[in-house]
Amino acid sequence: MTPEVMKQYPEASMIEATRKVGELYKKLPEEEKLLLKETDKPLRPPSAYFLFIRDAREIALKSRKKPETNAERRKFIDECAQKWKQMSEQEKQHYLKLVAKQYEDFQAKMSVWEKGMIEAGMESLVRKTTRKKMNIETTQEGQVKAKANKRGTKTKVKSTRSKGKVKVETTGT
């Protein structure tokens, strides 16, 4: 919803747009919120830096140096940031390889998830780039709209939510 909110409020900052999306979400009926939660969308993997912080935190917990106050937590994060900046690229390779592997897994899971969402008639939940590759366009309300491809043929996408299927037809010019 963020891109749509940004179109409606072009002067809004990203923080304001995010707040507006939150307000819109709160106004959704519980059934729609539940539907969004039940989609089991794969989570994007954390960054190499975040994995480093997680490991540093585990080491701190094992040595019983758990930061208790906000000031101690900030100090811990600052120290981790300094260590990360001082690490050579070779030292960071462990984390970079982990992230690369996790990202590959994420992409595979995301592809399967998106196909499922399209088959279930929930194309609006699919990434914009995937919809573009598949020649699927959604309106602001999440309804599917046919879009002409480069060759001049039209692709009709019919969404039948009650049956949970999507029918794609290609017609001549």
Image: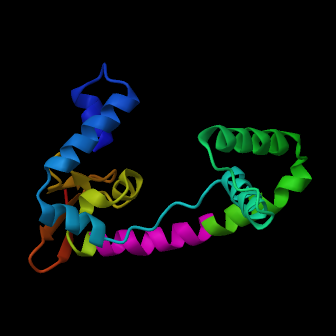
| Quarter of the view holding residue 31 | bottom left
Task: Give the left or right position of residue 45, taking residue 171 as reference.
Answer: right
Q: Is residue 88 visible to the viewer in this orientation of the structure?
A: yes
Identify the residue at horizontal 60%, vertical 57% (top origin): 46
- With respect to residue 139, does 32 lie above or below? below
Q: Quadrant of the C terminus?
A: bottom left
Q: Is residue 72 magenta?
A: no
* Predominant secondary structure, magenta span: helix
Of the pair 93 and 107, the residue shown nearer to us: 93
Quarter of the image that includes the N terminus: top left
Residue range of the region highlighted in magenta in the rendering: 103-117
| Residue 171 seen by the camera | no
Q: Is residue 22 left or right of residue 109?
A: left
Which residue sits furthest bottom?
Answer: 163
Asked whether 56 or 109 is in front, the reply is 56
Percent x, y for residue 161?
12, 72
Residue 69 image point, x, y percent: 62, 44
Q: Is residue 90 above or below residue 165?
A: above
Residue 152, position as x, y percentages in the image: 26, 52
Q: Nearer the viewer, residue 74 or 6?
A: 74
Q: How is the image coloured?
A: rainbow
Residue 18, image x and y in percent?
A: 34, 37
